[in-house]
Image (tube, rainbow, N blue to C red):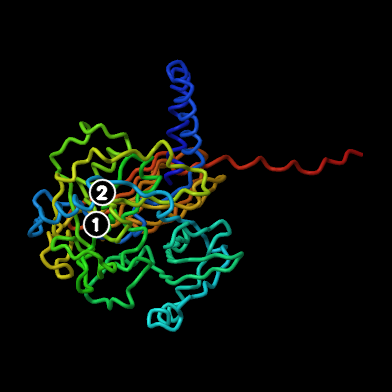
Amino acid sequence: MLGNRMTSIFIKLSLSGIFSSLRVLSLGALFMFLMFSVLLINGETRADQFFKTPSTWYDKIPANPLITPNSSNYVADMIINNGILTTEYRQWSIPIFYANNATPITTVTLKNPDTVYGKWMLLKHWNEIPIPADALPSNSADGYCAIINTVTNEYWEMARVTKSGNSWDADVTRKWNLTTETGDWSPKQPYDLHGGAQVSGVPLIKGLITYSEIQKGVIDHALMFGYSATRKAAHWGVYPAYKYNAGVSERLWAMVEGMRLQLNPALDCSTLGLNRYGQIVCKALQEYGMILTINSGPGSNNFIAESLENKPESWIGIIGSLNAIPLKQFRVVEPVCSDCSICPNCTSKPPSPPIANFTGSPTSGTAPLNVTFTDTSTGSPTSWSWDFGDGSTSTLQNPSHTYKNPGSYTISHTATNAYGSNTKTATSYVTVQSPPPPLPGPPKWVP
């Protein structure tokens, strides 16, 4: 888990370097250093790629992608709209809250239950949501709110939410299964029943910049991108969106939702004077690009970062200016897909090995400790190999293993398909303590 990994890293670095750091840091920098350390320890564990199924959002743009006709005209229109890129992380951002099976279910009252989509939401029970007590919608007219059940991997999103006491009302509710669904539009899905909080049909958390991935130092997905001049045209968008978001522009080269833009991969991000956040974003724009999903505020070209309002973490001092990223260095590329039958004119993603991943529970306790391991690898693996760190191995997909002796154990998990294999190693993932000594017996009677 990211929180545990970051805590371990922080402790190791702190013990060896904190005293030398104290000698060179100014008081202001020292304060930021200490605050950053607290955030790493107390920060909530989050997934960067929320959906666990393969998705175009997680596919890197190949070296020679197909370029959309009139790409330069679309980019020029983006520059007319606004000559810089920004990050929205306050009023119009997306707050995410985490639930589990013990979280009480709240029945959200739909504001328009008699519409076709309202009836569908009721039929699918998408308005029955485990809402944590501390959850609040965003403080904007859109009133967004996202809920993830970390046990069942189910995800709900709401739009135009109002909360009064314990009562919740919303215009839109939508539910996805993060393990089995992609959240990407397909022509096989009817638009009025696919839906979501965004009219484009793209889930709110797709392409969202999260606090945890910035702390980790890498964004491994395309970025959600909004600008205020989506084309006013017929209602179909392009993959992975499925509908224009009430486009307002009559300009010939205004972009449509679903278009993917890539920053010139040859550009050296380190020479642009960006802070750490800016360089992480810059690299992601080169590797994965940005996908237009939302018609945002007037004159904006912006990314969306998760809202940290009323949470222990903060974006202050982390998010920096992106003004130095040159918009003229972008190009519009055709969709990147594993299956080009669902996105015409796409750049086919070459077959690749899986990406190994796993979870285990419990990861600490007294000997003997039985741990159940669950494979969460992506990329359709067909075989698995486990090394439990105590000399024992397994080839089951989801094995259980009993640790008989105290110690810390490093787990290695390899997932394989026809195109290769990938290994994830988790150092000191399982910790086993000695069992408590037996209680003394009753005193012996001496006559």
Whether residue 210 is visible, yes or no, is: yes
Q: Residue at x 17, y 50 (%)?
A: 262
Q: Residue at x 15, y 58 (%)?
A: 349
Under mark 1, the amino acid is: Ile
Are dots 2 and 1 in contact, CB under 8 Å?
no
The crowding category of the residue bearing disc 2, from other C-alpha atoms within 10 Å (few below 14, some 14 to 19, many at least 20), is some
Whether residue 382 is visible, yes or no, is: no
Q: Residue at x 28, y 54 (%)?
A: 225
Query: Which is in the foreground here, disc 2 or disc 1?
Result: 1
Under mark 2, the amino acid is: Asn
Q: Compared to 302, does 127 lie above or below?
A: below
Secondary structure under tag 2 reads strand
Quarter of image, res 114: bottom left
Residue 220, position as x, y percentages in the image: 28, 48
Earlier in the chain: of badge 2 and badge 1, it is 1
Q: Compared to 318, does 392 lie above or below?
A: below
Q: Nearer the viewer, residue 372 or 110?
A: 110
Q: Nearer the viewer, residue 269 or 123?
A: 269
Quarter of image, res 280: top left
Residue 103, position as x, y percentages in the image: 56, 63
* Residue at numbered disc 1: 291
Q: Compared to 96, does 270 lie above or below?
A: above
The crowding category of the residue bearing disc 1, from other C-alpha atoms within 10 Å (few below 14, some 14 to 19, many at least 20), is many
Q: Residue furthest top?
A: 23
* Residue at numbered disc 2: 422
Q: CA distance from mark 2 to mark 1?
A: 28 Å
Residue 260, position as x, y percentages in the image: 19, 57
Q: Which mark is residue 378?
A: none
Residue 35, position as x, y percentages in the image: 49, 33
